[in-house]
Structure formats: C-alpha cells, structure tokens
C-alpha cells in the first residue's frame, strides 16, 4: 500500500501554480499526483491538529455542485470543523487548498 503525505499549497498563484501542475504532469501519472481532500479526509486531518483556525481550505466538491458553479470549503472555528459553500470562482486571500500527495 502506498503512503500518503499531506501538504499545504498556500499562496501559490498564477504562473507558479501552472508551473507546479505542469511539473507534476510531466513526471507521469504513476509518479506523483495531488488530489483535493474530501470533507471526510479534512475532518480526519483535523484530528491530528488544529488547522485552518484563521484560514479556510477548498475541498473536493461533488460534480453536480461544480456543474452549477459551486464549490465547498472547510475551516475550524470554536473547536468545530465547518463545511461551507461558495462560488467556485470566488477568491479569498485566506483560502487555499489542502491536498493528498501520492508519491
């Protein structure tokens, strides 16, 4: 079984994000991949520590919601993990992605 490590891509924007995606793509699909955490994975991550107490993170969104232009994100406030929705094109400086890196 392959091991998974959690990484945080925060403040990766514009050309830098495109370069990172291109680099991963050229390594081949079997070499490495990053997938957004699901809500369930995000909740499991929160059991390891207090993440996103002043920020929030996009999480994997069901395709039916994405087709309508929506997206889901989570954060931790008041010792509770919350799930929210917003337009997928919304930009907030304090919101990024949490992903699972497969190596």
Image (cartoon, rainbow, N blue to C red):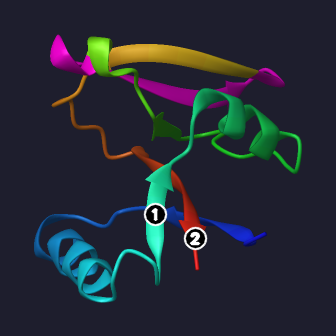
Expressed as whole percent of the image width and height from the top left, the position of residue 74 reads: 56, 28
The segment highlighted magenta reads 66-80
Between marks 1 and 2, how big is the CA–CA gap? 6 Å
Helix, strand or loop for disc 2? strand
Residue depicted at 54% across the width and 63% down the height: 8
**Residue 50 relative to residue 81: left or right:** right
* Residue under label 2: 102
Q: Which mark is residue 34?
A: 1
Residue depicted at 48% across the width and 15% down the height: 84
Residue depicted at 57% across the width and 35% down the height: 38
**Residue 56 relative to residue 39: left or right:** left
Expressed as whole percent of the image width and height from the top left, the position of residue 78 reads: 79, 20
Residue 27 seen anywhere in this rendered image of the structure: yes
Q: Which mark is residue 24?
A: none
Compared to residue 74, the image places residue 17 above or below, namely below
Outermost residue, left side: 15
Q: Quadrant of residue 44?
A: top right
């Amino acid at each position: 079984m392959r091991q998974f490590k959690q990484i945080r891509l925060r403040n990766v924007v514009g050309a830098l994000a495109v370069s990172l995606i291109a680099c991963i793509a050229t390594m081949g699909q079997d070499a490495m991949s990053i997938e957004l955490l699901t809500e369930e994975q995000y909740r499991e991550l929160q059991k390891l520590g207090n993440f996103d107490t002043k920020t929030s993170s996009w999480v994997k969104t069901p395709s039916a919601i994405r087709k309508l232009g929506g997206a889901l994100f989570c954060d931790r406030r008041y010792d509770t993990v919350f799930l929210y929705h917003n337009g997928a094109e919304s930009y907030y400086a304090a919101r990024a992605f949490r992903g699972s890196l497969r190596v």
